[in-house]
Image (tube, rainbow, N blue to C red):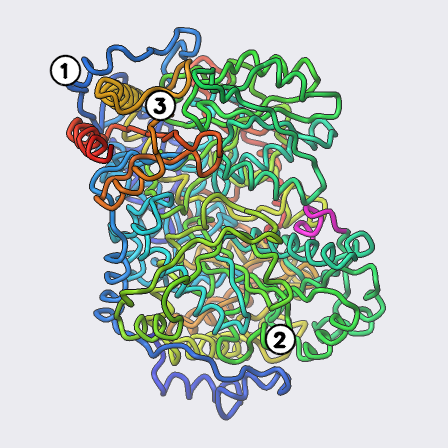
């Protein structure tokens, strides 16, 4: 089925007005040597048929009955009211607010988003959003290079390995070198970035130190000491955070972060097999003119009424072309709206409840597995809602549980061979006591 | 002054009455207060369960958070009831123009109807709740969908391989330029090839992308027919050129009618031919870039394949490549490792699953440029685009382009006497008029015309772009607008042209019916106010200025 409204009479009237005999005449400008040959595209489907096809594909997935999988993507309750807001066609079917007089809804919601991200992170300015946490992190690294005029970036091995790979790709563009700072992976070790190893990696050509908190192993990093180490070497400190954790944790602005990047997916965005998500980026006001991406600012209209516009566009590609701060064009406005609606719906008390319950359930999970003699913590130190547990024969047992519809977290051996016996298990507020009991019982059976 | 006496705030959809009454802001100069201003301490919307006694007991031995890592005060998020929150966002929604409300001929953006069955599909729990790191045996549906979509994009574009990973068109460009560089480096030619040629009609993202990859962007002028100047191109092509980035059909809405010669020249110079596929909506079934000899192209699923623009994203910008670029695609790539591809395809077309088919994410690609995004891309957009392609099918995809081109040409002939048309040729997806006559003769700029269009309930075309057209008005009607809508737009545009001559002041005063009037963009840039100032903090919103400053052109 097509969505074209035209009748044959409409088409005839238009062709007549244009003065061509048939629609083929509108394509005479395509040189005959390069005109399309036959293709192999299936026939049209009506709604009933296309629904059946999509239901078939959805049915080919098996949504686990019980899952402790996080590793950067978290299942949280998405309040119904959040889904309602982002379904509004005035938000969903508008485009980039180039005409501010008829885009105040989008513009004001982005201004509110920027304000919320500043408040969560303790920073002074936040962008209108980026593609995802990984690209926000990479763009932050490039921004640090522009700000410091240095050409290397140091990154903690505790960064999500997927982010690390995206960072590598982005840095390969302008030829920026990525330097690794190790994490203490020793049995019972800290599982964190040692400030002394960071200091070793830093030098007068390193633009920034990038550290995730909590890190990919679930561990809380000594952020203040690491920020001090970065600053001592004249570099910037980039904190990669998880937004719900900021209900409890000290905001990065307070421990000396110059730039903050984050994946905003936990804030009301479905896991949806990897996207669309929303990247968050925040900085100090002094560096705003080197920020990539869109920014919305408040101003007044001709009658003195308050309104919002895209601003500081002189940084952007459509004005600056080859001299732009980044080629980024769109943001993830609808997903940023989801985050704005989520943070509004839960409020400060609700966000704290989510963070605390997630943390309690992670401790419940750990306590139960340890008490049953099934697992032990791989590292010392502190964790939040995700924990690295040593489980003998982890890979086999993870696969065996998956066959029963239970996902026992993320096998860390996939990204770090030294952790082949370690599972990374996440809990959130949707993790029930029954889920934990089930995991304990089923893991017991795979011994 | 009470709210009821506030300046007229009808919006162009006629729903301004939503902003009167007790719910509106106390300050008459504010259309809808910020959500922070509606906050009252301890008011709640969504609540969460408490942890159980058993959970707390079993958690007891685990380490608590040390005080040193905790924040000293809670973030000042809004505290509102669920209804107050919903009304706030619904009122904001009323302030937006959108495709679902009215005609939105924003050139270069392909603002076509976004079918609702696509939304239904993207929300299916089996897809929306599929975790990207779930073990592959649990994710076969998601992987099959990505494989099938890539397969169809290959057919449509004539390319041999696809990466769905890039999150937007500009992201696809970045991917394409990184692959270009990887290709030249693999051929030992990386150091020598330092330039990327970009026509002067190109999207700003093209030169910005070239720079991000460390290339020098070199502008190639257009000829007097609006096409790329072949002489200038041949002169610029040399052993130092890595690629030509070209938008085809161009931002003038014109098909490069010497494209075969352009491609030959680029190939002979050993450079990569990159096509910006933003305007693919005009050429489905008529021109397949991969088949014609392009090496790389990015798609915009949010343009051609109808995924909603969302107020500026999310989009999706998959790239297609020919054989010589295939090894450099981002990884991983959904791949069929067990089962016959022909059979899987035939079954899917018939709505059947192939029981013994097995898909994996192939990450073993040693020459890959790496990853450009976490995980696999904007999957929700893949679901919508796949639904759209399957709904339209073979005939529907051809009809899309035929009707889109028909509509653009219809507007061209109906308006070419009212506005200047610097390149009066066959249009593809869009037609670019110039307001230079109105400016020269009546002092009415294209910005004024755009604002007058707002007062008539329609979203204006893209303005001041492409840069090579003075006072540009870039109109892309798309295939989903009825003849009545197109005729209504023609009437509006003709009426504005007449009014520009007879009563230019009325056009320059526009808009008067929108929720806010023309906004002072210069003040916004001079004193940036980018976040809410809580009580006690300094509010930096620029004060009303005595005279409105002209706006920077937007494109």
* Foreground pick, A309 / A346: A346
The magenta-colored residue range is B207-215
Element type where label 1 sits in the image: helix
Which residue in the protein does label 3 denote? B77
* Farthest bottom residue in view: A21
Under tag 3, what secondary structure? loop
Contact between marks 3 and 2 (CB within 8 A): the answer is no
- Magenta span: predominant SS is helix
Asked whether the beta carbons under mark 3 and mark 1 sit within 8 Å of each other, the answer is no
> Few, some or many C-alpha atoms within 10 Å of disc 1 (few <14, some 14-19, many ≥20)?
few
Q: Secondary structure at mark 2?
A: loop
Instruction: Please state the chain letter of the residue tagged with numbered disc 2 in the rendered image.
Output: B
Residue at 23 percent of width and 17 percent of height: A371
Quarter of the view holding residue A177: top right
Determine whether B55 is above or below B442 in the image: above
Q: Report x, y in % for residue A399.
A: 31, 42
Residue at 41% across, 47% down: A276
Which chain is indicated by disc 1? B
Do the residues indicated by labels 3 and 2 lie within the same chain of the protein? Answer: yes
In-front residue for pair A213/B44: A213
Can I make out residue B29 in this image? no
In reply to whether residue A112 is colored magenta, the answer given is no
Name the disc covering residue B53, or none: 1
How crowded is the residue under tag 3: few (<14 C-alpha within 10 Å), some, or many (20+)?
Answer: many
Between circles 3 and 1, the one closer to the viewer is 1
Q: Position of residue A369 (x, y in %)?
A: 25, 23
N-terminal of the pair, mark 3 or mark 1, is 1
Q: Is residue B208 on the magenta stretch? A: yes
| Contact? badges 2 and 1 (CB < 8 Å) | no
């Amino acid at each position: 089925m097509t969505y074209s409204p035209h009748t044959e009479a409409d088409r005839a009237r238009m062709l007549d007005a244009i003065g061509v005999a048939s629609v083929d005449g509108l394509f005479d400008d395509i040189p005959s040597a390069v005109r399309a040959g036959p293709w192999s595209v299936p026939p049209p489907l009506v709604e009933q048929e296309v629904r059946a096809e999509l239901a078939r594909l959805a049915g080919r997935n098996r949504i686990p009955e019980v899952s402790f999988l996080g590793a950067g993507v978290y299942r949280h309750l998405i309040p119904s009211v959040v889904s309602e807001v982002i379904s509004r066609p005035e938000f969903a079917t508008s485009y980039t607010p180039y005409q501010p007089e008829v885009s105040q809804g989008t513009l004001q919601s982005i201004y509110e988003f920027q304000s919320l991200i500043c408040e969560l992170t303790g920073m002074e300015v936040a962008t209108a959003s980026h593609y995802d946490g990984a690209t926000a992190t990479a763009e932050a690294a490039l921004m640090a290079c522009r700000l410091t005029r240095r050409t290397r970036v140091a990154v903690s091995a505790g960064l999500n390995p997927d982010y690390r790979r995206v960072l590598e790709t982005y840095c390969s563009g302008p030829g920026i070198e990525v330097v690794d700072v190790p994490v203490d992976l020793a049995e019972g070790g800290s599982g964190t970035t040692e400030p002394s190893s960071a200091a070793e990696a830093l030098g007068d050509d390193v633009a920034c130190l990038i550290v995730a908190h909590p890190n990919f192993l679930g561990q809380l990093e000594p952020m203040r000491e690491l920020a001090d180490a970065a600053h001592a070497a004249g570099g910037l400190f980039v904190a990669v955070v998880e937004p719900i954790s900021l209900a409890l944790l000290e905001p990065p602005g307070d421990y000396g972060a110059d730039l903050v990047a984050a994946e905003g997916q936990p804030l009301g965005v479905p896991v949806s097999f990897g996207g669309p998500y929303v990247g968050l980026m925040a900085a100090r006001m002094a560096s705003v003119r080197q920020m990539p991406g869109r920014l919305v600012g408040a101003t007044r209209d001709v009658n003195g009424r308050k309104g919002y516009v895209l601003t500081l566009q002189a940084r952007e590609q459509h004005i600056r072309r080859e001299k732009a701060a980044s080629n980024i064009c769109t943001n993830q406005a609808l997903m940023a709206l989801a985050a704005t609606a989520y943070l509004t719906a839960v409020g400060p008390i609700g966000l704290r409840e989510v963070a605390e319950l997630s943390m309690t359930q992670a401790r419940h999970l750990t306590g139960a597995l340890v008490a049953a003699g099934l697992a032990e913590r791989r590292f010392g130190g502190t964790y939040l809602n995700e924990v690295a547990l040593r489980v003998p024969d982890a890979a086999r047992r993870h696969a065996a549980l998956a066959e029963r519809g239970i996902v026992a977290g993320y096998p860390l051996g996939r990204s770090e061979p030294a952790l082949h016996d370690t599972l990374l298990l996440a809990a959130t507020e949707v993790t029930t006591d029954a889920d934990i009991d089930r995991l304990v019982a089923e893991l017991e059976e795979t011994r | 002054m009470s709210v009821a006496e506030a300046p007229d705030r009808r919006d162009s959809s006629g729903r301004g009455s939503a902003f009167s009454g007790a719910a509106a802001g106390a300050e008459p100069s504010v259309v809808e207060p910020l959500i922070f201003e509606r906050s009252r301490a301890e008011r709640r919307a969504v609540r969460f369960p408490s942890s159980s006694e058993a959970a707390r007991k079993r958690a007891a031995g685990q380490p608590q958070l040390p005080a040193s890592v905790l924040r000293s005060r809670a973030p000042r998020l809004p505290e509102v009831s669920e209804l107050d929150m919903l009304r706030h966002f619904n009122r904001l929604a009323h302030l937006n123009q959108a495709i679902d409300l009215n005609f939105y001929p924003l050139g270069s953006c392909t603002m076509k109807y976004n079918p609702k069955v696509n939304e239904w599909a993207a929300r299916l729990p089996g897809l929306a709740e599929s975790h990207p790191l779930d073990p592959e045996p649990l994710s076969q549906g998601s992987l099959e969908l990505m494989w099938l979509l890539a397969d169809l994009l290959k057919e449509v574009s004539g390319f041999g391989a696809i990466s769905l990973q890039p999150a937007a068109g500009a992201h696809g460009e970045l991917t394409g330029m990184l692959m270009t560089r990887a290709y030249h480096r693999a051929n030992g030619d990386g150091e020598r090839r330092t330039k990327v040629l970009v026509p002067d009609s190109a999207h700003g993202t093209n030169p910005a992308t070239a720079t991000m990859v460390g290339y020098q962007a070199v502008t190639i002028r257009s000829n007097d027919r609006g096409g790329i100047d072949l002489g200038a191109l041949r002169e610029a092509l040399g052993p130092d050129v890595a690629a030509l980035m070209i938008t085809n059909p161009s931002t003038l809405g014109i098909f490069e009618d010497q494209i075969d010669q352009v491609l030959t020249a680029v190939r002979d110079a050993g450079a990569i031919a990159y096509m910006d596929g933003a305007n693919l909506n005009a050429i489905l079934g008529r021109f397949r870039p991969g088949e014609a000899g392009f090496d790389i192209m990015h798609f915009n699923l949010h343009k051609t394949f109808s995924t909603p623009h969302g107020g500026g994203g999310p989009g999706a910008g998959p790239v297609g490549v020919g054989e010589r670029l295939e090894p450099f695609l981002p990884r991983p790539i959904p791949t069929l490792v067990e089962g016959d591809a022909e059979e899987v395809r035939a079954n899917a077309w018939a709505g059947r699953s192939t029981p013994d088919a097995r898909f994996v994410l192939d990450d073993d690609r040693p020459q890959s440029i790496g990853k450009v995004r976490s995980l696999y891309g904007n999957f929700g957009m893949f679901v919508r685009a796949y639904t759209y392609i399957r709904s339209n099918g073979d005939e529907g995809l051809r009809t899309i382009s035929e009707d889109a081109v028909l509509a653009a040409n219809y507007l061209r002939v109906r308006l070419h006497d009212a506005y200047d048309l610097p390149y009066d040729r066959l249009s593809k997806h869009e037609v670019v008029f110039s307001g230079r006559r109105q400016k020269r003769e009546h002092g009415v700029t294209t910005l004024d015309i755009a604002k007058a269009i707002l007062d008539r309930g329609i979203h204006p075309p893209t303005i001041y772009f492409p840069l090579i057209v003075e006072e540009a008005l870039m109109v892309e009607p798309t295939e989903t607008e009825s003849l009545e809508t197109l005729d209504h737009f023609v009437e509006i545009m003709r009426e504005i042209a007449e009014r520009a001559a007879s009563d230019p002041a009325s056009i320059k005063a526009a808009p008067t019916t929108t929720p806010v009037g023309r906004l002072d963009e210069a003040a916004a840039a001079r004193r940036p106010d980018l976040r809410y100032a809580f009580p006690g903090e300094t509010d930096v919103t620029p004060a009303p200025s005595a005279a409105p400053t002209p706006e920077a052109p937007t494109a």
